[in-house]
Image: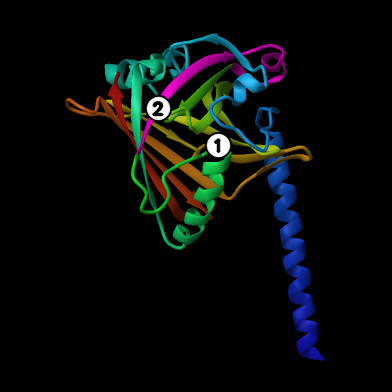
Amino acid sequence: MSRIRRLLAGVILAAVAGIVALIRARRRAREVPLSPILGDSYIGGDWADRRDLRGASVPGEMGSLDAYESESFDPDRVHPDVRALYEQTSEFEMRVDATWYRPFRLGARAASRLTSRVEQLNLPGPGDAAKRVESDLATLAEPAASRDPREAPRLWIRTEPDGTGVFTAIYASYEREDDRRVDIAVPLPSANLSTVLAVHNDDAGIELTTDCPDGGLYLTTPVGAISLPADQRFRVQPAPGEPAAVARQYIRLCGVPLVTIRYDVFRR
């Protein structure tokens, strides 16, 4: 009988801990502006057109790096090729490769079948060849732009040369205590996955990291948003000759390395 009581007590404690964690995750998500735009069962490279979300074409992911100037980021220190990648993104194409880590490799292989069908977060799976990716950028059209609580949202649509969707996201920003955050919303079926990042200098490159008070990954659904037990960091560095720059994206889940994504960036 005492063994059953201990088991029952353990189940109750686990349930209470789960509820408390969920409440905290929902409360944390309410503290940041998140895009309300959710995805469909299929995303693909034409998602923005199907949803009438495409506005005017723009050259870059953002208007100017100067908007992110702060005590921890001096845009004048950034190499011209790295700066151009953000302000003149359409002038570049990328080669994308991914390194998946145990214990997530098996799950990543199965997930890659789903992401290739949905054509979103369509990264190379374990053992797959790198992908060549082209970019298409535009403002977010009205009335969606007015409903988005973030500033100056822009679409960045990445596809393979044959038009297969690789990655579609709505890039924007907001200001928090004199620091401007990058705020990226990735549409998923009936949801979106958002990332909030702080911007720092990294020698002649840029570091973007969720390691800041409001940073993190957030899942938005029709019933609300929650923060996720995940973090990520980007390091973007100039490269001698070709490619013009190399970006590495490090993602961890529950503190365990999940994947490193490498972007070799070439001028068109």
x 64%, y 12%: residue: 141
Give 196 or 57, whichever is nearer the viewer. Answer: 57
Task: Classify mark 2: residues with Cα within 10 Å, few (<14), some (14-19) or many (20+).
Answer: few
SS of the residue under disc 2: loop
Residue 161 numbered tag? 2
- Look at the image and say whether residue 182 sits in the magenta stretch: no
Q: What percent of the width, then of the height, locates residue 243?
A: 24, 28
Residue extending furthest toward the front: 162
Instruction: Please state the extent of the stretch shown in magenta in the rendering.
Output: 131-152
Residue extending furthest toward the left: 241
Q: Is residue 162 visible?
A: yes
Rounded to the nearest whole Å, what is the CA distance between mark 2 and mark 1? 33 Å
Q: What percent of the width, then of the height, locates residue 85?
A: 36, 20
**Lower sequence index among marks 2 and 1:** 2
Task: Classify mark 1: residues with Cα within 10 Å, few (<14), some (14-19) or many (20+).
Answer: many
Give 251 or 25, whichever is nearer the viewer. Answer: 251
Please say if 81 is above or below 215: above
Please say if 239 is above or below 83: below
x 17%, y 27%: residue: 240
Please say if 234 is above or below 266: below
In front: label 2 or label 1: 2
Please tell me in which quadrant of the rendered image residue 97 appears: top left
Please tell me in which quadrant of the rendered image residue 47 appears: top right
Q: What percent of the width, then of the height, locates residue 237?
A: 29, 30
Q: Is residue 59 left or right of residue 50?
A: left
Residue 215 numbered tag? 1
